[in-house]
Amino acid sequence: MDNKHWVVRIQERFEKIIVSVLILMLIIVISFTTYDMGHRLFTAIFQRTDMLFQLEKDDIYKIFSAFLLVLIGIELLQAMSVYLKENAIHVETVLLVAIIAVARHLIDVNYEETDALKLIGFASLILSLTVGYFFIKKAIHKIKPEDDSGNIDNKEGSELIPKTETIQK
């Protein structure tokens, strides 16, 4: 029998329901965003009779930004799925989402109008996130056992925020 207080059990069920609803909503958003992006891309490419297969520089930036937005959604979907299955948040996934989000923002930045201090801030942020990601991945690689083929087992030791065990009094 479960020794958890009934309020804790309700709270855990509530979290699972909310995360499940968020996952479904994110699947819908990613699907529509991907469809819209594909529709706009093909329309932009194939409806120009004067310049077939040529896109303007701004169009390409918008396309890359949209691709990164979909990647952010996919990474968030993965993070929520892991949370739902393992009740743990993987720090490397959070850092990866942050890196992609900053990269997407940097594509949209108008560098001619942005002051140097803000650009230095972006550089510092990217450096901090990538260094953090590097050390997290390095720590995970040391923790995860490898099989004979050199592949890392994804099922054991991948949690960076471990589950806490309840101590019975």
Image (cartoon, grey):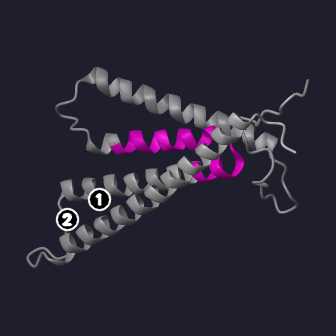
Q: Is residue 10 magenta?
A: no
Q: Is residue 101 magenta?
A: yes
- What count of labels does the image hold? 2
**What amino acid type is highlighted by mark number 2?**
Leu
Residue at the image point whose x is 64% and y is 50% from the top: 84
Q: Residues within 10 Å of mark 1 (few under 14, many from 20)?
A: some
Asked whether residue 125 is in view, the answer is yes
What is the magenta range?
Answer: 80-104
Q: Which residue is mark 2?
A: 55
Q: Quadrant of the N terminus?
A: top right
Position of 35 compared to 49: left or right?
right
Q: CA distance from mark 1 to mark 2?
A: 10 Å
Position of 169 compared to 14: left or right?
right
Q: Is residue 151 above or below residue 4?
A: below
Residue at the image point whose x is 30% and y is 64% from the top: 37
Q: Which residue is mark 1?
A: 63
Tell which of 59 and 166 is nearer to you: 166
Tell which of 74 and 108 is nearer to you: 74
| Main secondary structure found in the magenta portion | helix
**What amino acid type is highlighted by mark number 1?**
Ile
Tell which of 65 and 8 is nearer to you: 8
Q: Residue 26 placed where, x, y %?
A: 45, 56
Asked whether residue 160 is in view, the answer is no
Residue at the image point whose x is 66% and y is 33% from the top: 135
Residue at the image point whose x is 33% and y is 41% from the top: 105
The answer to whether mark 1 and mark 2 are in CB contact below 8 A is yes
Q: Quadrant of the C terminus?
A: top right
Q: Which mark is residue 28?
A: none
Position of 27 compared to 164: left or right?
left
Q: Residue 64 placed where, x, y %?
A: 33, 55
